[in-house]
Image (tube, helix red, strand yellow):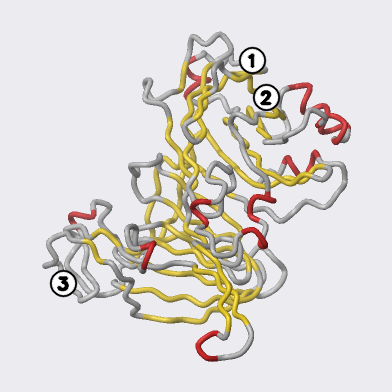
Amino acid sequence: MDKLGEQLGNGQPIKPYRALLAVITRDHQPSGRKVAKDPETIKTSTDFQKQNVKDFVSTDTFLIRGLVTVGDWTGPFLRVSYRGGPDTKLSVAANHQLGEKIKLWIKVAGVATPALILVPYNPLSDRYEVEFWGYPGNDLRNQLDDKGRNALDRGELQVRNDLVHGSIADFNREALSDRYILDVAPTNTMHPILPLHVELAWADFSEKIWDSQNGANYQYEFNMIVRGWDHFLGTGISSNPHGGIGFLEYRNLMSNYGRYSSKPELGRQLNSWNFNAFGTKNHGNGFERFFAVDYMDLHVLNASCGIGLHRHRDNQEVFLMMDGQGFMVVGDWCKMPERERCFEIRTLQAGHFAMLKGGNLHALMNATDEQVSLFMFGGYD
């Protein structure tokens, strides 16, 4: 995972990433027992349906968003890159004559660039790469070291407040009490709850050759459900909680009640191939408002160990990190309405959980040299 923001800073500590990586996948190959890829043909069975992924091939576009610190400012960035290999769609169409720069059309959260953006080739990564910062001032060059200034000069680093918005200060704890987090800085590129939609297309330098899905463009969205101390629906303080003493500060992580009832996150839309929480397919494809739990497990992952990439047929599942941290991977087993088929990777820290929907590909990797502890629960399979 490339963290240009950390590399380009002036030596000051970088705040922890809310790092997200969307990798677009073309195909995956199952391992173990055969499970139908078409959900309509999945057999009627109540055993634990699972499909492990043996291999996959990524496409040419990667996207990363995160936080960067420079000077007194900590705010968001968005990094977009295109593979430099000779077998990319753009290279093949250009007869392998792409040159040192290609061009990018991009729309972030509904805001499109008025002109195409030049994207330089980085020989160290063998990718065409550009990183957009939401830096609010006009003195960024003075805040950077030589590596950062060189990145500015070649166009790999760009200040684009039209595309990337906000600051980490938007979500300071003292300003959030009794507020609905969806109403707080909704245009912040690193909003802790709201998804970020990105639409883009690539062109060669002459703008005569395009990789754009025949003009439909590529649709991507950062939307992994992660909740915890800094990813929540709402917060507040209760005095004398439940007849006790003092004050209780709370974080509302997920809810089907009150102001959250119009979009109950704990529910799911049933399809014809799903079993409902009562183990039947006679449900009329309705909406199940609740999250039934059929199992609760404690797990310990040793250093450099991981839970492999796999998916279940029906069950929702929660990975709660109790101690340590790991890379949580959640992906699409088919093309989704809001984005191309993607893997999304985030750092799951102690006190945070990721929630999976039925059919999501998922994995968890412990890349540290210490054990991590997990609490997992889920249901429906």
Q: Residue at x 52, y 67 (%)?
A: 353
Q: Are marks 2 and 3 in contact (CB under 8 Å)?
A: no
The numbered disc on residue 280 is 3
Q: Are marks 1 and 3 in contact (CB under 8 Å)?
A: no
Which quadrant would the C terminus be assigned to in this image? bottom left
Which residue position is annotated with label 1?
Answer: 99
Q: Secondary structure at mark 1?
A: loop
The numbered disc on residue 121 is 2
Query: Foreground residue, 308 or 176?
Result: 176
Q: Tell me where residue 261 appears, x and y as whole percent.
A: 33, 63
Q: Mark 2: which amino acid?
A: Tyr
Q: Secondary structure at mark 2?
A: strand
Q: Tell me where residue 175 appears, x and y as whole percent.
A: 64, 58
Q: Mark 3: which amino acid?
A: Thr
Q: Give the spatial CA distance, label 1 vs label 3.
A: 58 Å
Q: Mark 1: which amino acid?
A: Gly
Q: Give the spatial CA distance, label 2 vs label 3.
A: 54 Å
Q: Are marks 1 and 2 in contact (CB under 8 Å)?
A: yes
Task: Tell me which label, 1 or 2, sits earlier in the chain.
Answer: 1
